[in-house]
Amino acid sequence: MTPDGAPQTHVAGAGEPAGPQSDVAPGLDQATTEVQPLEVVVVTGLSGAGKLSAGRVLEDLGWFVVDNLPPALLQPMVELGARGDIRRFAAVVDVRSRAFSSDLQESIRVLADAGNRPRVIYVHARDEVLVRRYESVRREHPLQGNGTLIDGISAERTLLTGIAGDADLWVDTSDLNVHQLRATLENAFAREGRTQPLTATVMSFGFKYGLPLDADLVIDARFLPNPHWIPELRPKTGQDAEVSAYVLGQDDAGSSWTATPTCCGC
């Protein structure tokens, strides 16, 4: 109030912060609102060809994977991921989504225009292989309708013609098992064409306790004398130089150890 009782009006200066009742919108911090581009992979292809398996491989490789994502939600999901700590985003998109073909191609174009790096994996297989896979699980094809299974597969191939032509990587799973599919995708997205080095874990065990559950290769070394029966070596372990020298000093130890890398495929 002024001395004469009139209401007083105060206008904040340029360097003075606005009060709580101010209707002046705060400025945006450009450093916090800037969205960094992501690596984006779209996994699509024929139903029953292995898209879900491909998605699981990418997830194991550190990608954030969303299954059955409608094409229209690709850009919003990528934007949400970019605002967090997600740098690699993968989506499995197929004919289960409505308006699939045209919307997917347009969504990929929008992602590229936004500065992202979208790549498309097209997963497919021969008709007879797809029929056999569907019959083994006794499920209907999503486009089968009132027709036959092969009718649904043919309709899907026709629908996917456009996106298949734009794919960066074609993966034919007709003659691949899940391990070969994994190797194919790892070679494309994890190793960039380089051969992955073999990682081997060597462990010893007693047969009376049973085989290790996760062993890929078991080498039976019972043909070598057991240092346990040597009184002065019994308190020691295989990490002691005396035990190692005793075992590797046997006549058959050298030849068997030399052959082991060959058995492992090294």
Image: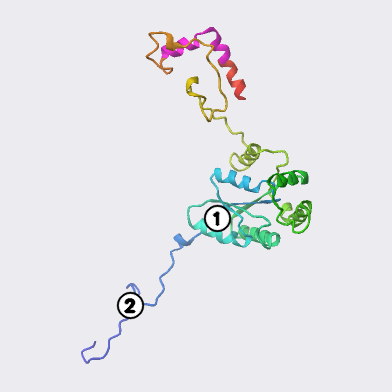
Q: Residues within 10 Å of mark 1 (few under 14, many from 20)?
A: many
Q: Is residue 176 left or right of residue 28?
A: right
Q: Is residue 187 left or right of residue 225?
A: right
Residue at the spot of label 2: 12
Q: CA distance from mark 2 to mark 1?
A: 40 Å
Which of the 4 quarters of the picture holds residue 265? top right
* In-front residue for pair 156/112: 156
Question: Where residue 242 sits: x, y (%)?
Answer: 41, 11
Question: Which range of residues does the magenta coloring cover?
Answer: 241-256
- Residue 92 vs 252, above or below: the answer is below
- As shown in the figure, which amino acid type bears the numbered disc 2? Ala
Q: Contact, CB < 8 Å: mark 2 with mark 1?
A: no
Secondary structure at numbered mark 2: loop
Question: Where residue 66 sits: x, y (%)?
Answer: 57, 53
Residue at the spot of label 1: 37
Sequence order check, earlier mark of 2 and 1: 2
- Rendered-image quadrant of the C terminus: top right
**Colour style of the rendered protein structure:** rainbow
